[in-house]
Amino acid sequence: MIRSTYFSALANGDVEPASESKVLAVVRRDLPDWAEGLVDRHVPTLAPPDDLRDSYKTVEEAADRDGHVEPRRIAWESVDFEDRYHEHLDTGPTQQVLEAVKQEATQRAVWLVCWEGSERWCHRRLLRQRLQDGRTETLSTDVSLPPKENTYPSHRIDEIACHPTKHEFVGGPAPHTKVCDRCGLGSTTISDFLDQDPTPSGVEGR
């Protein structure tokens, strides 16, 4: 089984992979210490190559400065991200790593983790699709995020989240993260997946 999430969701406890799961960081750069502790292994080979990542970020930042509503979409399409990333996955060394992850996924749940909250304009969506075959189930956090794999196997975020005005945020387990003390969801998850203001008027973080 292939599953997908992002570091903030792990850090805030929005997602808790089962102990037997394999959690893989699929990012290019070295991880900060707090993030290293959230994964079993860092697999930079499965991240976009530096030239693709840098091109994407350059266009995204320019589009954001120009006030475009969807700078990530503009960057994705402008640099031909999908085709170039698939070309990277087709290289010999990367193919070997893909096959190893596929085999691992036949034995246990494998989680793909990167920095982006939404995988719509993220390489892990493409990677998740490439790893899927007849024996491998995939689950995207964009579709149905079980916040705690053992405790809430069939719940969606919107079923456990507080009312938008009821969140009470406290510091999360990792630097610069916040989690609601009432429903347990992280501020990034509340913003990205529920489209709620994570700091609604009148609610003070503690």
Image: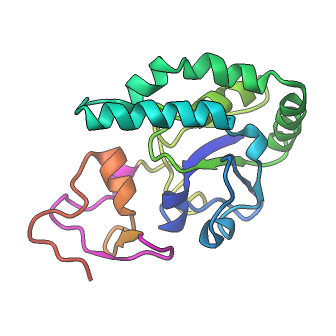
- The answer to whether residue 101 is left or right of residue 52 is right
- The answer to whether residue 178 is left or right of residue 203 is right
Image quadrant in which the C terminus is located:
bottom left
Name the quadrant containing residue 195.
top left
Name the magenta segment's main secondary structure.
Answer: loop
Which residue is located at x 58 percent, y 62 percent?
Answer: 16
Q: Nearer the viewer, residue 111 or 56?
A: 56
- Indicate how the structure is coloured in the image: rainbow
- Expressed as whole percent of the image width and height from the top left, the position of residue 161 reads 31, 58
Q: Is residue 170 visible?
A: yes
Image quadrant in which the N terminus is located:
top right
The magenta-colored residue range is 157-176
- The answer to whether residue 100 is left or right of residue 160 is right
Which residue is located at x 85 percent, y 45 percent?
Answer: 107
- Expressed as whole percent of the image width and height from the top left, the position of residue 60 reads 41, 34
Name the quadrant containing residue 204.
bottom left
Q: Nearer the viewer, residue 114 or 195?
A: 114
Which residue is located at x 58 percent, y 36 percent?
Answer: 53
Q: Nearer the viewer, residue 184 or 28?
A: 28
Name the quadrant containing residue 100.
top right
Is 200 in the magenta? no
Residue 163 position (above or below residue 181): above
